[in-house]
Amino acid sequence: MKNQAITIFGAPLEEIDTEVPTPQGTEVLLKVTHCGVCHSDVHIHDGYFDMGGGNKLEMGRLPLPFTMGHEIQGKVAAVGPDVTTVKEGDSRVAFPWIGCGDCPVCARGDEIYCNAPRQLGCNVNGGYAEYVLVPHERYLLDYTGIPEGLAATYMCSGLTAFGALKKLGRVTKDDPILIVGLGGVGMMGVQFAKAMFGQAPLVADISQDKLDEALKNGAAEAFDASDPKVAKAIKAATGGGVQGAVDFVGAESSFALANGTLRKGGTAVVVGLFGGAFSMPIPMLPFTATSIRGSFVGTLEEAKEMLELVKGGAVEPIPVTERPLAQANQTLDDLRSGNIVGRVVLRP
């Protein structure tokens, strides 16, 4: 089978040929029909995450060549002898955030936090390929009623937005919330916020095109994140600040905006991985009673809950563009330069 693989960190992906895996035990072989391209793929491809202050989290332990791609949709091509709930020809999306399955974290359903992860496209070979091996049928979810291609994006982009918004806690329709960063995940966040909280969120980004797209898709008000007075403008527009802000960029400036627009008792959730560092006076946390939370995608149960919400028609689709798998390099470059509105999915 053909793969678009990392052979040298930071160098263009190369097309390589590997053997099609044969599923054993509970394993399922999925023939990939669509695979979304996520901004975290850019960091994996670069070989590091920026930790701020010149520090880097290196990806040196990742064996090369490596096939990325964790937003995977396809058809069941073959099953292991212990598989009972899916059969050849079934259309499924793959939940990629897989743990070891044996530790206490996995036992309580939080395998996204497992210290021995087997995450498709992140720790084990993923969907920038013609086939991908999924370790158990329980990770294959029915997406009936969701358009082809779009369904793949919900396994990271959608789930990340859904999981982050859930971490804001109790939000009423009168509590303003802010979404910072309108890439594919942020655009998903706009739609999920409307469905989950019964209100249109405020949005902020440095791209006017993305702000316009968000307004077209139901955002309440848009703010230019590059304006040095943007935090004051948001506080003025909301009568003192927002109850919750989700930073889908994860840069120093985007976090400063999310945290700086909170009202007392508000919550900032950081999702993006752009990089950097921050500091603040410790007494400000009790003085303002604000919370700062990190969010890493979502659990398998949250993925099922999210898909039911989407199937019910409560979430409007974001723009999705299809490209051939051979354009994986160009797509990563377009993500780096911020030239993608919505999401791109690759088709082997």
Image (spheres, helix red, strand yellow):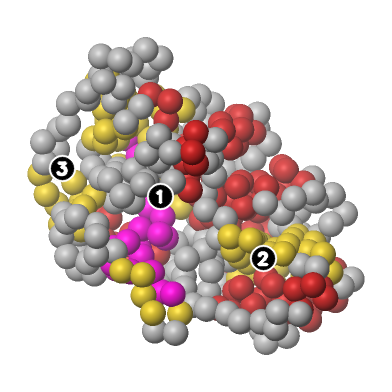
Q: Nearer the viewer, mark 1 or mark 3?
A: 1
For badge 2, the amino acid type reads Ile
Q: Quadrant of the C terminus?
A: top left
Is 47 above or below relative to 150?
Answer: below
Answer whether residue 318 is visible to the viewer in this image: no
Tell me which residue sits at (57%, 79%) in the image: 278
x then y, percent, for residue 25? 26, 20
Name which residue type carries label 3.
Lys
Spot the residue most to the bottom: 228
Instruction: Give the alpha-carbon distance from disc 1 to disc 3, as whole Å.
Output: 30 Å
Q: Secondary structure at mark 1?
A: loop
- Residue 328's place in the image compared with 283, above or below, is above
The residue type indicated by label 1 comes to Asn
Counting residues from the start of the chain, the first of labels 1 and 3 encountered is 3
Provide residue 24's location: percent of width, then percent of height.
22, 23
Magenta-tinted stretch: 33-51
* Residue at the image position 70 percent from the left and 68 percent from the top: 222
Q: Earlier in the sequence, mark 1 or mark 2?
A: 1
Mark 1 vs mark 2, CA separation in Å: 23 Å
Q: Position of residue 160 (x, y in %)?
A: 54, 50
| Residue beneath disc 3 | 2
Q: Which residue is mark 1?
A: 115
Q: Is residue 333 rendered to the left or right of residue 229?
A: left
Tell which of 29 and 292 is nearer to you.
292
> Based on the displayed image, in which of its 4 quarters is residue 61 positioned?
bottom left
Percent across and percent down for residue 187 are 58, 55
**Residue depicted at 60% across the width and 47% down the height:** 163
Residue ID for mark 2: 292
> Is 38 part of what is drawn in magenta?
yes
Mark 3 burial class by Cα count in 10 Å: few <14, some 14-19, many 20+:
some
Q: Badge 2: how crowded within 10 Å, few (<14), some, or many (20+)?
A: some
